[in-house]
Image (cartoon, helix red, strand yellow):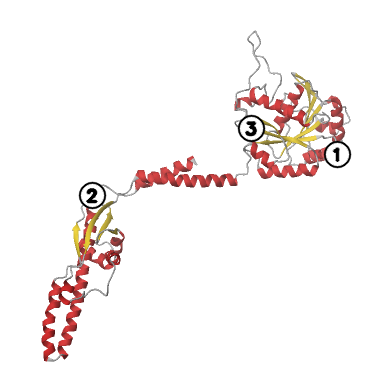
Amino acid sequence: MILTVVASVAIATALSLRSPKQYAASAELLLRDPGFAQALFGNNLFSTGQQEPQRTTQTAIDVITSLNVGAQAASRLKNNEPVSSLVESITVTPNTNADIATIKAIRSTPRGAAAVANAFAEGYIIYRRQTDRATVAQAEELVNQSLATASPAEQAKLAESLRQPGVLRSLQTGDAEVIARAQPNGTPVSPKPKRSALLGLVVGLLLGCGLALLVDFLDRRLKTLEDFERACPDYPLMAGVPHAPEHAKAPKQLAGPIGESYRMLRESLRFLDPSGLARCFLVTSADEGEGKTTVAINLASSLAAVGRKVILVEADMRRPTAAQRLGISRGARGLSDLLVSSEEVDEFLVRVDGEPGLAVLPGGTIPPNSADLLSAGRMGELLSLLSESADVVIVDSPPLLPVADTRVLLRLSELDGVIMVGRAGLSRRDRVRAANQVLAQSTKRVFGLVVTDVKGWSDSGYYYDEAPPPNGQPRQPSVRLHA
């Protein structure tokens, strides 16, 4: 909206400043009938009946803006401008309380505006005088025709009446009088940058509101926690992870609201499974880049921090990143190698430095088709063995919609439940709903939803770090978190 308003005001102001200046001048006409015909003939020779004053004034205005009067004005101006163009440059406004018409002309120069307004005022008088005199001439012609066929007695009367049209013809004034001639005015009536800027502001606000509503309607991204709750009404919101600044996105210990959000996730999981019977959890998302691996790593780390023995399984064998974030070399043997061998599971587990309760089963060698490898039949047995040797097993799976790997894992009975991950500003409403349908078809329990990159989350300021030890050295937080 701000960009639209600024652009509208700038465009309107620029166009106004670039527009050529226009000047206005006005002449006033008094419209009146002197009544000479009534005095000479006892009736109005030029009237067809009783007319209302408003109608008479409007008729005069229509005549002033006619091409005939425009031709009279053009002859007085003595320029080559088309008559239609001259007519378009004037406006005629009646006075509501008097028989006065104001002729306003707008031209490129002050003198030109005054000349055009005066030319139309004088042109109207000339045109009306000519038409009235033509009417009198027609009356004279009728009297002359009657003289030719009249008797001697009638001819005397007709000869007397013939003198009256001659007198009336010489008395024609055009039924109007210029009571105020137009004078040049050096103040331009346009452009007016301030008025144009104000108009641009109003148009920009309306257009900006419309565009904002349209963009919001067409934008399928979920941006707030409320958006995710509406898209996933059947899943409880377990935690919202705040937006991490760029300097906090390297694997290191994190404190503050981000660390607290993963502790909230850990405790939410305890609330949702108070019996503690669920031990194997799959962490997934609808699409890539939504933070599922980060959530899986930090959930495993926060559980290990309270004395739970946790194994993190890197089941995303297509793009494995979890083990590398925890400091494990990329070429380490892992899940893919274990699924095709008969070696013991312990041979492939890697302990995480500084976190004695956490072990990782890396993804291993990237297989040509990980979905077929997971479907081979040993994955369920492997999860059962891991659940027996640990308190909690966290499975970092591939995204749910792009590949088939997670759908294969959802068929395993050894899997106790799913944690769905979404990213504020990235997850799309239609994709999240499609993932929900897949999870509903799998009949697996979805423990809840975790939303990452939430802006404005945990801004209350209530959170505080632990007090430093007496020697002044900062105390390391009890939970190792990884961005």
Label 3 secondary element: strand
Residue 34 appears in the picture as rendered: yes
Label 2 secondary element: loop
Residues at marks 3 and 1, CA–CA distance in whole angstroms: 36 Å
Residue 359 in picture, x, y percent from top left: 79, 24
Q: Looking at the image, is mark 2 or mark 3 nearer the viewer?
A: 2
**Amino acid type at image mark 2:** Asn
Q: Eyeballing the image, is 264 above or below 151?
A: above
Q: Which residue is mark 1?
A: 376
**Amino acid type at image mark 1:** Ala
Residues at marks 2 and 1, CA–CA distance in whole angstroms: 94 Å
Q: Which residue is mark 2?
A: 185
Q: Which residue is mark 3?
A: 453
Lower position in the chain sequence, tag 2 or tag 1: 2
Q: Eyeballing the image, is 17 above or below 172?
A: above
Q: Residues within 10 Å of mark 1 (few under 14, many from 20)?
A: few
Residue 176 in picture, x, y percent from top left: 20, 64
**Amino acid type at image mark 3:** Asp
**Mark 3 and mark 2 in contact (Cβ < 8 Å)?**
no
Q: Residues within 10 Å of mark 3 (few under 14, many from 20)?
A: many
* Residue 66 placement: quadrant: bottom left
